[in-house]
Image (spheres, coloured by chain):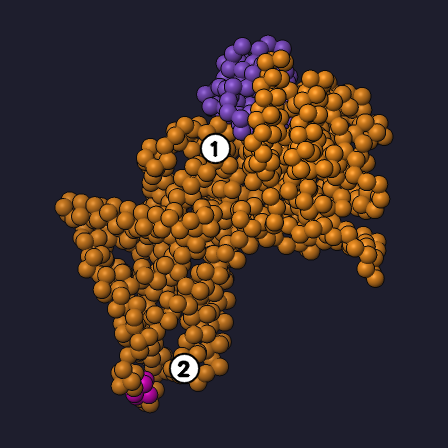
Chain colours: A purple, B orange
Amino acid sequence: MIPLTEARPGQRVRVSKVDCGRSLRTQLFAMGLTPGARVEVLSVNDGPVILSVMGGRLMLGRAMADKVLIKEA
Amino acid sequence: MSNYVRQGESTVSAAGKVITVALAGNPNSGKTTIFNALTGARQHVGNYPGVTVEKKEGSCRHGRTKVNVIDLPGTYSLTAYSAEELIARDVLIHDKPDAVIDILDASNLERNLYLAVQIMELGVPLVLALNMSDVARQRGLEFDLNLLQKLLGAPIVPTVGHKGTGREALLDAAVEVAGNPKPRSALKVDYGREIEAEIGALQDGIERAGIETDPVLTRWLAVKLLEGDAAVRERVADQELVAAADGAARRLESLLGDSAEALIADRRYGFISGACQEAVRSTVESRHTLSDRIDSVVTSRILGLPIFALSMFVVFLLTFTLGKPLADGVQAGVDWLGQATARLWPTGSESSLKSLLTDGIIGGVGNVLVFLPNILLLFLAIAFLEDSGYMARAAFIMDRLMHKIGLHGKSFIPMLVGFGCTVPAIMATRTLENRRDRLVTILVLPFMSCGARLPIYVLLIGAFFPQVWQAPMLWIIYTIGIVLAIAAAKVLRSTLFKGESVPFVMELPPYRMPTLRGVLIHMWERGGQFLKKAGTIILGVSILMWALSVWPRPSPELLQRFDQERSAVQGRRDLSSQEKQAMLSELNNATAEAKLEHSAIAHIGRAIAPALRPLGFDWKISTSLLGAFAAKEVFVSNLGIVYSVGQSGEESQSLRQKLQQNYTAFKAFCIMLFCLITCPCMATVAITRRESGSWKWALFQAGGLTLLAYVLTLVVFQGGRLLGLGV
């Protein structure tokens, strides 16, 4: 399990845990980032992270991406 | 929980039925376009009382039925996370609309259905609009609509919002669903044995406590309690029940290994993906779309920032170069109107009414209208960037920089709007959910020099700097504003607004070609905010300032003397008519100057002048600055009067000459610096008060900025004097 910020561009991963406060968790779930969700990492550098989730594209601020733990798909 | 919406109406009148339809959907799903397509021009925007959430309503006729449409705020879910979601669900539960249309982005169906599932769990009569179905088809997605309808339990209408396709079918479905006499039936997602058991127990508890009897609602409340929904917990108010829910959640977590909320969300998505797997086929094997490929360039480390800088440059170039001739045109029009009105009175008439109409009202309206072209052009450009999807990428690129000052990418958009007018910019901060981020952004927004300050800069730079220095000087002034905003944000974030940076998540909609209609409507939303909210206050304060500049009047003897001198000039035979005109003009200017000198505003200006002298300002500048409380632009016109060049604008050569005679380039710079920072116009103060919810922040902003302007200009001026910088 590693945080999203340590993923590699192009990597396909699954969300394993969302390690943050309740309100943020709720927001992430509503956008498709539930535990077990399949996600493709599109862009990772020292700014926000861009993901492909369920056909849409999400941008997570770095602090947020740090709290999303993933594992290889 | 809800006293801000009326009961839904479903009545039969002589002309046919009246039904209420609510539009729900994710942001970026095309909901607004469909709302516009349904209601056309028959819409109006208000506010839900007590919260800063827009209430959009409209209506249309469909056959013999009148359809009232409520455009609910765009939401991803129906949780208690944001005011928008709470409003959406309150309207659905308490307002009982006759039908709900949930607008789904067909290319992003599974996530869009998350909201639909929650609406279905409420048992509201539902129609699903499969929007942007053209894009989905292009992407190779195929939908078995009949099967999908059956699996989801709601009629589905394919639509293409920006072409208006499906509008009639959508209304047909809504009217039909609304007219269906069957009682409320809700979707029951199977949450699994363990969770269902806990739900059942909580339902019993809710019924026993007398909170609710409708089984659809008891189930809904039970699920929300398990999810830990803050608003439901508050509403239920039964300690035992809340404790029971907490206990249930804990049991589920230790049994199943994840929070109850995560498990529930997971099951909803499971239901959705089950339905989609059967009814949706992807025929093209391309995970990456054209948008992704564009993004790999636009958001890349190397090219991202330059592309962004270029786009900003183009936006501002457009605004300044196209805006100027248009603004000149507006000014000419206002001047003409003023003169035409003045001609209704005999020449030289001293009527107060005439002055009120021409200088007060028409002048005041002119203050507002003259920078409307600039502002609208900026908003047009921003609307284009937003509708095309690029703005979200801009927020991405700016995020790294904004992060360094303690804000994030989302704050960037209001700041961009602030270069047009601070009022719509402050309203644009509503997208910042975190109150602290929102307040800091609102407080530093005035540093983004709004359109009204431009005439001040144009006048002073034009008067004191050679042609080749003019554009760079303007650029320097704007940059100083930005630098100060950054510094102020940093200071605020390390003192009054301390705390961890709030994480943010933002959707990146696919790129698309904006439609002219969409962009114009979008531009007009912000432009309208400027006119209605800023404009009315600016007009009001302008009239007040006018009154202060007209009373008290000079003594009748003095006025008579001017009159006599005027008649004397007109009676002279030895002057050509051209020379007479020139002398009369001078006399008129002198009269105006005398009137101003006697007025209340000049008295106040002279009273505060000593305080401003250390900044290098004389009483004429102080008096002109007072007028700028109404609108910054008034500074220029007041300066014209005080230097007795009469009605003049920032291009006026005579005013420029007068200024050159009396000040230096360095002093002009200090004036611009002061104007850049000082208290924003009254309209901004009023909107800050409304959006922040208290006078505290509005006054802090006004006072703080004025103080900062004073201190900084003082330091710069005195420092310059010490260095002998042309004082």
> Which amino acid type corresponds to the residue marked 2 in the rendered image?
Ser
In the image, B223: left or right of A9?
right
Q: Position of residue B509 (x, y in %)?
A: 61, 32
Q: Position of residue B287 (x, y in %)?
A: 67, 20
Query: Dot 1 corresponds to which residue?
Result: B409
Please report the residue visible at 26 percent of the width from the left and 64 percent of the height from the top.
B605
Disc 2 element: loop
Q: Position of residue B91 (x, y in %)?
A: 66, 44
Chain hosting mark 1? B
| Residue B351 numbered mark, or none | 2
Please report the residue visible at 63 percent of the width from the left and 39 percent of the height from the top.
B74
How far apart are labels 2 and 1 at the CA level? 55 Å
Please state the extent of the stretch shown in magenta in the rendering. B563-568
> Which amino acid type corresponds to the residue marked 1 in the rendered image?
Gly
B143 to B72, vertically: above or below: above
Please report the residue visible at 33 percent of the width from the left and 80 percent of the height from the top.
B584
Chain hosting mark 2? B
Would you call the spot at circle 1 few (<14 residues within 10 Å), some (14-19), or many (20 or more)? many
Quadrant that contains the N terminus of chain B: top right
Residue closer to the observer: B12 or B536? B12
Please report the residue visible at 49 percent of the width from the left and 76 percent of the height from the top.
B340
Does the magenta run of residues contain B693? no
B573 to B62, vertically: above or below: below
Q: Main secondary structure of the magenta part?
A: helix
A12 to B727, vertically: above or below: above
**From where the camera sits, is residue B717 visible?**
yes
